[in-house]
Amino acid sequence: MFIGVNVAMFVITVALARDLFNNQQSELFAALLHYAPSIAEGEWWRIVTSGFLHFGPVHVLVNCVALWFLRDLELLLGRLRFALVYFLSMLGGSLAVYLFAALGTRTAGASGAVYGMLGGLLVAVIRLKRDKHVLMSVLGIIALNIAFSITVPGISLLGHLGGLFVGAVVTAGMVYAPPAKRKPVQIGTVAAVIVVVAALFVVRTPQVNDQVFCTNPTTLECYYATRL
């Protein structure tokens, strides 16, 4: 489902921009990407919609392939819980960028959710007490991806780490919940994460408004493109 949404949004922005490799030039893309000053002014939808946008075909392909290979987590958690981990990881990535990135940064991409899936997979492997080789493989994939995020320009390390952390926390609440209290613990974990994320967005917003340096946020020169 999420792969389909990501691909559909990419096709729409390509059609509007009339350019396969520069779909970010469409007005829709600009209206939906993550841009802190606009979010602080009330355009809260960007927190979510930015997670379904991608800069060019390579960007969307890499993220969709990663989601395909992480589909086993859906088999373990079930469709609803998997969707919650995905969505909250995406919010975690958006939050990390909102809290710590430069105000002129604009971000888009599903990698916050992808890293959340990686964090969730790591927690699941530990919980299931799988072979150490499996654990080391997952740790190696995460380390390799983080190293890639650090060394390659234009990639949002903050978004990746935020998604990774939230995905691990939410998955832990789901797979470590005791059988007798499984549903209350899982619901409580999801609710707690939502409350904390929402509270941090609210706390950060006045600070963003106080620090906005761009007098015309619709001007491309005000943006710094970063891929999630």
Image (cartoon, helix red, strand yellow):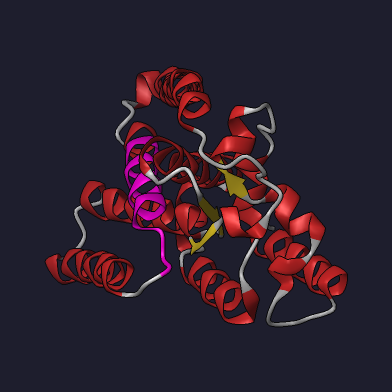
Q: Can the viewer see residue 182 in this picture?
A: yes
Find residue 73 and report its horizontal and vertical position in percent.
45, 56
Q: Which residue is drawn at 62% across and 66% down?
A: 54
Q: Quadrant of the N terminus?
A: bottom right
The residue that appears at 69% across and 77% down in the rendered structure is 22
Residue 163 is inside the magenta segment? yes
Mostly what secondary structure, the magenta segment? Answer: helix
> Hey, which residue is sitting farthest front in the picture?
215
Query: How far from the left and from the top, in percent, is residue 162?
Result: 37, 45
Q: Can residue 7 be seen in this view?
A: no
Q: Which of 226 and 111 is in front in this view?
A: 226
**For the magenta stretch, what is the residue range?**
154-170
- The x, y position of residue 201, in whole percent, is 49, 26
Q: Is residue 202 above or below residue 123?
A: above
Q: Is residue 131 left or right of residue 14?
A: left
Queried whether the magenta region covers residue 171, the answer comes back as: no
Q: Which residue lies furthest to the left in this view?
A: 132
The mark tally for this picture is 0
Q: Where is residue 200 in the image (x, y as percent from the top left)?
A: 43, 23
Which residue occupies 69% across, 33% down? 43
| Residue 138 occupies quadrant | bottom left
